[in-house]
Image: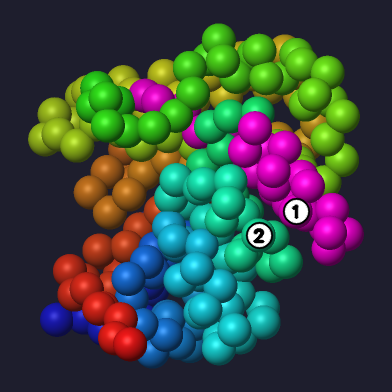
């Protein structure tokens, strides 16, 4: 069984230029993250704001924390002082809340628009029409402490790799259309966050720039917090 460092080294060796690894450390203890950090990993993804804030307090300052799970407006305050990127923006209201909290710290927080590309209704995300309505709004244009830098999506959980590929390609097409229509000439709008442990190879072939990998790095072990 390979170590965390060896798993990271293997995955990174398969990534082409321009693709970055987000090590999904949700539910994992700080020791696991420290081992990954020792192996050179700097970007870590969490899905619970309070858990991420607690880890931020005890781990190295140069870690880039990415919030990859659904984010409730009331929880933005926990991560606004330090989060490097929020992948899961699915409404104007959430974006406005992030802007408000970021302003308190004089920060501009990078965000991705999350799109619903899977067949499962349980997965969250916007439609392309909803995203365009957001981007055309005066309320969006008034925001000064957030920066949209790309899109995110989660494919259907299925063994049909052809379907997964079609969904990733669909997200890439959405990215290209939004780029051309709303972000032409804006070099910061360049990220496609798609692909996880079981399908990141397909995601890379379809244009992903950020792959979110947890199980293939840390294994199936779940860390349960105790009081």
| Residue 131 position by quadrant | top right
The one of 7 and 50 positioned closer to us in this rendering: 50
How packed mark 2 is, by other alpha carbons closer than 10 Å (few <14, some 14-19, many 20 or more), is: some
Verify whether residue 152 appears in magenta: no
Q: How far is disc 2 from disc 1 in space, using C-alphas? A: 6 Å
Q: Is residue 161 above or below residue 180?
A: below
Q: Within 10 Å of the Cα at label 1, are there few (<14), some (14-19), or many (20+) other Cα atoms? A: many
Q: What number is the disc on residue 77?
A: 2
Magenta region includes residue 105: yes
Q: How many marks?
A: 2
Residue ID at (19%, 31%): 161
Q: Provide the residue designation for mark 1.
A: 101
Task: Residue 43 in the image: state x and y as whole percent.
Answer: 54, 66
Cβ–Cβ below 8 Å for labels 2 and 1? yes
Locate residue 196 relative to residue 173 in the image: left or right.
left
- Secondary structure of the residue carrying tag 2 is helix
Helix, strand or loop under label 1: helix
Determine whether, in the image, residue 138 is placed left or right of residue 25. right
**Residue 226, percent from left and from top:** 29, 86
Residue 103: x %, y % from top left: 84, 53
Instruction: Check the image and report above or below for 73 versus 26.
Output: above
The numbered mark, 2 or 1, whose residue comes first in the sequence reads 2
* Residue bounds of the magenta highlight: 93-117
């Amino acid at each position: 069984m390979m170590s965390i460092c060896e798993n990271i080294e293997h995955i990174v060796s398969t990534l082409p230029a321009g693709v970055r690894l987000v090590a999904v450390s949700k539910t994992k203890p700080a020791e696991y993250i420290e081992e990954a950090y020792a192996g050179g990993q700097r970007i870590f993804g969490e899905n619970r704001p309070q858990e991420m804030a607690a880890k931020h307090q005890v781990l190295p300052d140069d870690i880039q924390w990415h919030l990859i799970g659904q984010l409730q407006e009331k929880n933005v305050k926990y991560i606004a002082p330090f989060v490097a990127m929020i992948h899961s923006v699915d409404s104007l209201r959430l974006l406005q809340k992030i802007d408000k909290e970021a302003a308190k710290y004089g920060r501009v927080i990078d965000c991705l628009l999350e799109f619903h590309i899977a067949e499962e209704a349980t997965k969250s995300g916007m439609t392309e029409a909803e995203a365009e309505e957001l981007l055309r709004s005066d309320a969006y244009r008034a925001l000064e402490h957030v920066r949209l830098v790309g899109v995110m999506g989660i494919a259907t959980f299925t063994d049909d790799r052809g379907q997964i590929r079609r969904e990733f390609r669909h997200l890439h097409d959405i990215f290209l259309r939004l780029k051309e229509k709303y972000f032409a000439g804006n070099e910061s709008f360049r990220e496609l966050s798609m692909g996880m442990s079981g399908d990141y190879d397909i995601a890379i072939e379809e244009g992903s720039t950020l792959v979110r990998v947890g199980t293939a790095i840390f294994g199936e072990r779940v860390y349960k917090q105790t009081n």
